[in-house]
Amino acid sequence: MKNNQNKKRAFSLMELAVGIGVVGILAAVAAIPLTRYIEDGKGNACTQQLAEINRATITYVSINNVSQGDYSSTVTENAISVYLGGKIVNTDFKCPIDGTYSLGTWGAGDSGPQDPTCSCSKKEITARLHSLGNK
Ligand SMILES: [Zn+2]
């Protein structure tokens, strides 16, 4: 009689422990690439935002006929915010990896405004900026 009751149980404690252990190992294995994808996603978001800052800067310079000599005094985070939906760079238009954006400069020898940069650890950002249709 007692033996019959035991056979009705679906899983023994040991089987459950092994099952939970296997699921835990699979979850841990899946979490490693997931973390990397999340970091890549944040890096891509930063790159996209740099491209937006660059477009806003170029638009501002074009519309206001900003020359190389006026560039550093005219092109500011507040000035280009009009072309970023009213958002101000580094105030409410921030890097998702806690970097700090720097607007591009326009030195005497440069043919035009240089690309903005970010201080975050994603080194490939500047290289990818040009491949995002930022021409
Ligand atoms: Zn960044």
Image (cartoon, rainbow, N blue to C red):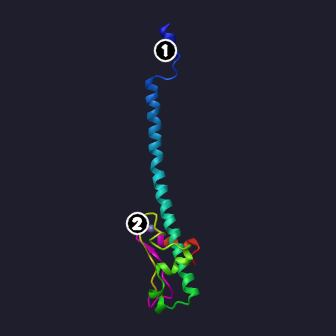
Which secondary structure dominates the residues rendered in magenta? loop
Q: Which residue occupies the foreground of this view, 78 or 41?
A: 78
| Count of residue discs | 2
**What residue did someone put label 1 on?**
6
Residue 53 image offset from top left, x and y in percent: 51, 75
Quarter in which the C terminus is drawn: bottom right
Residue 108 image offset from top left, x and y in percent: 44, 91
Q: Residue at horizontal 52%, vertical 89%?
A: 66
Q: Residue 17 lies in what quarter of the image?
A: top left
Q: Quadrant of ligand 1?
A: bottom left
Q: Which residues are magenta?
A: 107-126
Q: Any atom of ligand 1 within 8 Å of the CB at mark 2?
A: no
Q: Secondary structure at mark 2?
A: loop
Residue 95 image offset from top left, x and y in percent: 46, 67
Q: Residue at horizontal 55%, vertical 83%?
A: 60
Above or below, 55 relative to 1: below
Q: Mark 1 belongs to which amino acid?
A: Asn
Is the residue marked by circle 1 packed among few (<14), some (14-19), or many (20+) residues within 10 Å? few
- Confirm or deny contact between disc 1 and disc 2 (CB under 8 A): no
Above or below, 119 relative to 61: above
In the orientation shown, which residue stands out farthest toward the top? 1
Q: Residue at horizontal 46%, vertical 53%?
A: 35
* Residue 121 badge: 2
Q: Secondary structure at mark 1?
A: helix
Distance, label 1 to label 2, CA atoms, is 59 Å
Residue 116 image offset from top left, x and y in percent: 47, 77
Is the residue marked by circle 2 packed among few (<14), some (14-19), or many (20+) residues within 10 Å? few
Q: Mark 2 belongs to which amino acid?
A: Ser
